[in-house]
Image (spheres, grey):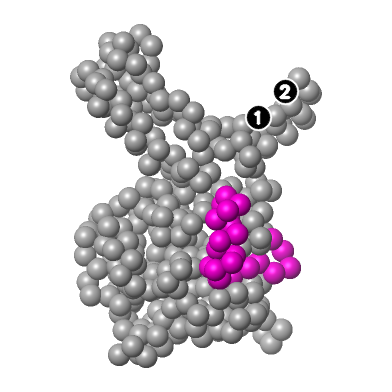
């Protein structure tokens, strides 16, 4: 089944308390080479059949309207998973 | 007067909100998220809880449930709507109020009796207060940090849309100590603290007079009932 991937990150200028908590843990573990952590989300949308331009556009709209909240997050990428049957549609 | 309280999957304080309506003298009507039916109510409360386990974002999935079509339409037509905690998050996700609510800046769940200052006493849910009045109601959340872009913040501050501000302690890192908002029309109010938990002596926050005697939250519910009487 073809899969559309939607990647979302908290806005760079906003505090990401979850990422900050992980960064704190890394610091306590002595992993000083990693100075910051930000945590985002990845959605995998399975498509029954071919990924058409219309379906990809619908996924982009869904990413903007529902999967993310533009007040606090940015949609980083919407793409068809490499290796999927309809990968060329991207 | 009938006040509807919507129950979503994962709502926690729907019964408490119904009880607060009854203590204030109104008739509480249970509404169901999966219906398209408001059952003739005059006002609506979206209660606290963890609808859909806070999946996706707090309130995001509930904001797209069937009954929200009717709630949004009623709110835009002027019906009083109060969102408490998760209900506030649902109002924000439904775009009835501006901004967003993110994880508390300190990362912890917080549960405390919270002092607030009333900033807008002209809304459907706050007209029984006076501007500057200090009240105490319980607060309990992990994702109550209010954020919004600078331009919108300036606008809502300028137009009196900040309804409540945290006093003494900012419990979650909210911008400008914002605890609650109203829409421009004043019929939609959302806040993170829980007024429904401060409506009956013996079950509210402690006061200097007696333990658990605080009932400051009752004014939210009497305000909306008084408003309905005045319009009748």
For residue B129, side relative to residue B33 (left or right): right
The quadrant in which the N terminus of chain B is found is: bottom left
Looking at the rendered structure, whether the residues under marks 2 and 1 are on a common chain is answered as yes
Residue topped by disc 2: A34
Q: Is residue B196 above or below residue A26?
A: below
- When asked about the image quadrant of residue B216, the answer is bottom right
**Number of numbered markers:** 2
Q: Position of residue A59 (x, y in %)?
A: 33, 30
Disc 2 on helix, strand or loop? loop
Disc 1 on helix, strand or loop? loop
* Crowd class of label 1 (few under 14; some 14 to 19; many from 20; radius 10 Å): some
Q: Is residue B68 above or below residue B117?
A: above
Q: Position of residue B88 (x, y in %)?
A: 47, 60
Q: Are marks 2 and 1 in contact (CB under 8 Å)?
A: yes
Residue topped by disc 1: A37
* Crowd class of label 2 (few under 14; some 14 to 19; many from 20; radius 10 Å): few
Q: Position of residue B205 (x, y in %)?
A: 62, 75
* Residue B62 is inside the magenta segment: no
Q: Nearer the viewer, residue B10 or A53?
A: A53
* Residue B148 is inside the magenta segment: yes
Q: Is residue A9 above or below residue B144?
A: above
- When asked about the image quadrant of residue A64, the answer is top left
Q: Is residue B227 above or below residue B191?
A: below
Query: Would you say residue A9 is visible in this rendering?
Result: yes
Q: Chain of mark 1?
A: A
Query: Would you say residue B179 is visible in this rendering?
Result: no
């Amino acid at each position: 089944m073809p899969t559309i991937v939607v990647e979302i990150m908290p806005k760079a200028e906003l505090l990401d308390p979850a990422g900050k908590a992980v960064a704190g843990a890394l610091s306590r573990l002595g992993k000083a080479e990693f100075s910051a952590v930000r945590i985002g989300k990845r959605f995998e949308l399975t498509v029954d059949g071919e990924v058409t331009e219309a379906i990809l556009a619908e996924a982009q709209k869904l990413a903007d309207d529902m999967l993310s909240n533009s007040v606090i997050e940015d949609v980083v990428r919407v793409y068809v998973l490499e290796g999927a049957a309809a990968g060329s549609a991207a | 007067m009938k006040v509807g309280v919507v129950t979503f999957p994962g709502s926690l304080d729907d019964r408490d909100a119904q009880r607060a309506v009854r203590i204030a003298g109104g008739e509480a009507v249970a509404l169901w998220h999966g219906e398209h039916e408001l059952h003739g109510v005059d006002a609506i409360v979206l209660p606290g809880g963890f609808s859909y386990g806070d999946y996706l974002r707090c309130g995001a999935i509930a904001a797209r449930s069937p009954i929200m079509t009717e709630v949004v339409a009623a709110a835009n037509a002027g019906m009083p709507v109060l969102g408490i905690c998760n209900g506030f998050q649902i109002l924000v996700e439904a775009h009835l109020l501006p901004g967003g609510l993110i994880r508390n800046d300190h990362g912890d769940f917080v549960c405390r009796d919270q002092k607030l200052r009333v900033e807008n006493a002209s809304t459907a849910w706050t007209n029984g207060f006076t501007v500057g009045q200090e009240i105490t109601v319980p607060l309990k959340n992990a994702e109550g940090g209010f954020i919004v872009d600078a331009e919108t913040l300036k606008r809502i501050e300028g137009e009196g849309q900040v309804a409540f501000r945290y006093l003494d302690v900012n419990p979650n890192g909210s911008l400008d100590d914002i605890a609650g908002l109203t829409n421009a029309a004043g019929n939609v109010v959302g806040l993170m603290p829980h007024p429904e938990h401060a409506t009956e002596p013996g079950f509210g926050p402690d006061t200097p007079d007696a333990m658990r005697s605080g009932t400051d939250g009752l004014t939210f519910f009497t305000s909306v009932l008084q408003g309905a009487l005045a319009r009748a």
